[in-house]
Amino acid sequence: MAQSPYEIPAEMRDFAEKSVEQARKAFEGFIGAAQKAVSAAEATPFAVPGVKEVGAKAVAYAEANVKAAFDHAQKLVNAKDVQEVLRLQNEYLKAQLTTLQDQAKEFGAAVQKAVTPKSS
């Protein structure tokens, strides 16, 4: 059976899948180092109260967003044709826009809480 000119060749999908997995593993190492750095910063005598929560939230958001991107990339790798790629891309962008809006609200509230002086 002849391959449609709009289908993604299996060889290209295999290569992309391996690349996505390698990038995912590299990111897992990076996020582990970032979590250690945030923990180390919290242990210093110069740590500002409330920064722990803000730093943890920032790392958690970065981790969640990159994980969503890797999951999306995995779906794209398995797409059979351009129409499926476009549908997946549209779904991902809509979901990420909602996620980023929610994260911005939560992060703003966390920062506001961290910088607001506590009354005794």
Image: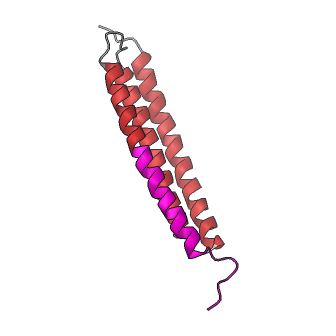
Q: Residue at x 40, y 39 (%)?
A: 31
Q: Residue at x 45, y 22 (%)?
A: 112
Residue found at x 62% / y 73%: 8
Q: Position of residue 37 (x, y in %)?
A: 37, 27
Instruction: Please tell me whether residue 12 belongs to the stretch shown in magenta.
Output: yes
Q: Position of residue 66 (x, y in %)?
A: 48, 47
Camera-nearest residue between 107 and 36:
36
Q: Nearer the viewer, residue 113 or 41?
A: 41
Is 18 inside the magenta-drawn segment?
yes
Say whether residue 56 is left or right of residue 107: left
Q: Which residues are magenta?
A: 1-28
Q: Is residue 97 above or below residue 31?
A: below
Location of residue 97 with respect to 118 vertically, above or below: below
Tell me where residue 77 appears, x and y as whole percent.
53, 66
Which quadrant is home to the N terminus? bottom right
Residue 80 in sight: no
Is 4 situated left or right of 57 in this image? Answer: right
Quadrant location of the C terminus in the rendered image: top left
Residue in the picture at 57% in, 64% down:
88
Q: Main secondary structure of the magenta part?
A: helix
